[in-house]
Amino acid sequence: MKKYKPTSAGRRDGTVVEYKKKLTSTQSNPLKSLTKGKRSTGGRNSDGRITTHYRGGGNKRTYRLVDFKYDKKNVPAKVETVEYDPNRSGFIALIVYADGERRYILAPQDLKQGDTVEVSETAKIKAGNRLPVSAIPVGNYVYNVEINPGAGARLARSAGNHAEVVAHDSKYTTLKMPSTEIRKILNTAWASIGTVSNEENRLISIGKAGRARHMGLRPKTRGAAKNAVDHPHGGGEGKSPRGHRRQRTKQGRPTGKGQKTRSPKKHSNKLIVNRRKPGPLMGGKK
């Protein structure tokens, strides 16, 4: 991490990742054929109503078309560049296959320019390689994990995250997720070996409000500071208690403080061996 000299109040507490040490080049533009435009929603749905609050503004972002399906198998690829992606917390890598095709992939830790990666059932257990989870020995870290075989990676995709292979049993493989949840997935699903890059992302201190606005984050108002008509925690004289036992969202649903928010009728509940543990293990408060 890089800390600046405290020349101002904003600089005093702000920290940034030292991209020069992590990326191939901090000035390189993304490959144009693997990009497309992306409009900012401002937290609004197709009807124009705000469904996710406190979003808006921010810098424009060019969307990089990252390959999460990995449908090109048994063809070795070489890493050309490791690049920054404004749309995700981890870094991405531009790889070129032996037949000349180029694709972006989510880069694991310690992946460097010139390294080779492969998607194959017989690939080596090496960071960046991708195999069916049934072929990955117990104790290895994986990321970019599929839930439905062939549908593309869904689990363990953000910076510094990984899932751990805990056990193999008939047609299922048991994984320990970044959230501490232990769950089963079909062992025909594929996963990449390693941990997602940019592990220092969680240590970043934004430092000042202006930097948050550049990221598209707007100021947040506490529910208790609002009127009763605007939030379940609002209203009352002065600094009043919230008036009900459970913390709630603006829509009245339970949230935070170790409360269970997962639907009891969710179809994948039967695949969960141990529920996640809220609190410090997930980065929450004690």
Image: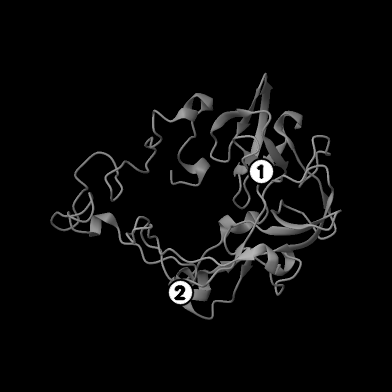
Residue at screen point 65% across, 48% down: 68
The colour scheme applied to this rendered structure is one colour
Q: Distance between the residues labelled 1 and 2?
A: 33 Å
94 horizontally vs 253: left or right: right
Q: Position of residue 152 (x, y in %)?
A: 63, 43
For the residue pair 235 and 57, the one nearer the viewer reads as 57
Q: In which quarter of the image is residue 226?
A: bottom left
Foreground pick, 241 / 164: 164
**Disc 2 marks which residue?**
210
Name the residue at the left extreme.
237
Give the residue type at disc 2: Gly
Q: Please give the label number shown on residue 96.
A: none
Around disc 1, counting alpha carbons within 10 Å, would you say few (fewer than 14), some (14 to 19), or many (20 or more)?
Answer: many
Q: Earlier in the sequence, mark 1 or mark 2?
A: 1
User: Which numbered circle lies on residue 143?
Assistant: 1
Residue 22 against residue 143 in the figure, above or below: below
Residue in the image at 37% along x and 60% along y: 44
Q: Which residue is drawn at 21% across and 41% down?
A: 244
Where residue 28 appears, as percent x and y from the top left, is: 72, 72
Q: Nearer the viewer, mark 1 or mark 2?
A: 1
**Residue, x 34% and y 58% (percent of image)?**
47
Q: Do the residues labelled 1 and 2 touch (CB within 8 Å)?
A: no
